[in-house]
Image (tube, rainbow, N blue to C red):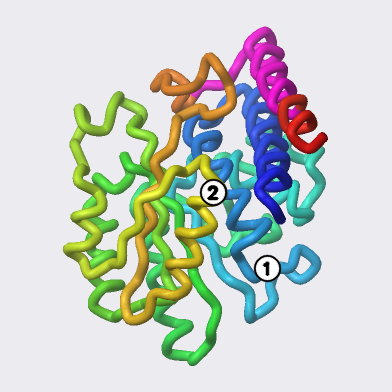
Amino acid sequence: MNNLELKKVANQVRKGIVTAVHSAKAGHPGGSLSAADIYTFLYFEEMNIDPKDPDKDSRDRFVLSKGHTAPGLYSALANRGYFPVEDLKTLRKLGSYLQGHPCMQHIPGVDMSSGSLGQGVSAAVGMALGAKIDKKDFRVYTLLGDGEIEEGQVWEAAMFAGAKKLDNLVVIVDNNGLQIDGPVEEVNDPNPIDKKFEAFKFHVINVDAHDFDAIRAAFKEARETKGVPTAIIAHSLKGKGVSFMEGQVGWHGKAPNDEEYETAMKDLEKIDEELAKEEA
């Protein structure tokens, strides 16, 4: 896909996020929106996957470590064809397969259930090691939050990945600077994030999380890096695409009301219009 096509898809992913969280009257829009471009690139460009055969053995694996941003993953999966986009409206509802955190037993395309913060990266490291042991060439991707990396388990996993030279592993940090309690540097400052991963023997790439040229180059560089795992520090804007959510910590875990939903969707429809002009 070219950049314009990716931007169009990413905007649909954002619409799905806002719609799902509004319908549920609960959820985490801010960090889902900040990661929407990364989700889009992974599922529409980077990963070897097939929605018609979601369990194929040779597929690349994705682990959502910051599991509360499930609306972003669900919207990407739905738009990629794993299940109907209409089902996003059932988020967190009784009996729905789309609950607050992803469940691998019930959702097509989900490779690992997400739970407590910090745990997902350990699962991803295990998958990457398993691929090496079994001499399989699939790659493993995992998405973490910058607040999440305050968890000690993240660094145990990073130490192991570096020690085992897991060059089939890509750790992506959605670095939007905000967590539930405020700016990350005020809660428990994880910076400098890049230097920390370098200390754990990772190849590190800093990237603008909303620039598809930069994202494409980063993942290409990760593929070409041998002998060490890669960490992509994706510098993003919390709530990206929705005017009143952008850069606002209050939208970490809150659903828009009906009026806010209308405003959010108008914002995203304006982006659609701008992209249509760009195409013309």
The reply to whether discs 1 and 2 touch (Cβ–Cβ < 8 Å) is no
Asked if residue 116 can be seen in this view, the reply is no
Residue nearer the viewer, 177 or 154: 177
Q: Is residue 83 above or below residue 156?
A: above
Label 2 element class:
helix
Would residue 259 be counted in the magenta stretch? yes
* Mark 2 residue crowding within 10 angstroms, few (<14) / some (14–19) / many (20+): many
Q: Position of residue 102 (x, y in %)?
A: 57, 50
Label 1 element class:
loop
Which residue is depicted at the point 55% across and 17% down?
243
Q: Position of residue 189 (x, y in %)?
A: 19, 37
In the image, farthest residue toward the top? 259
Residue labelled with disc 1 = 49
Residue labelled with disc 2 = 38
Q: Nearer the viewer, mark 1 or mark 2?
A: 2
Would residue 127 be counted in the magenta stretch? no
Q: Amino acid at mark 1?
A: Ile
Q: Amino acid at mark 2?
A: Ile
Report the span colored magenta.
254-272
Residue nearer the viewer, 225 or 158: 225
Q: Position of residue 192 (x, y in %)?
A: 20, 46
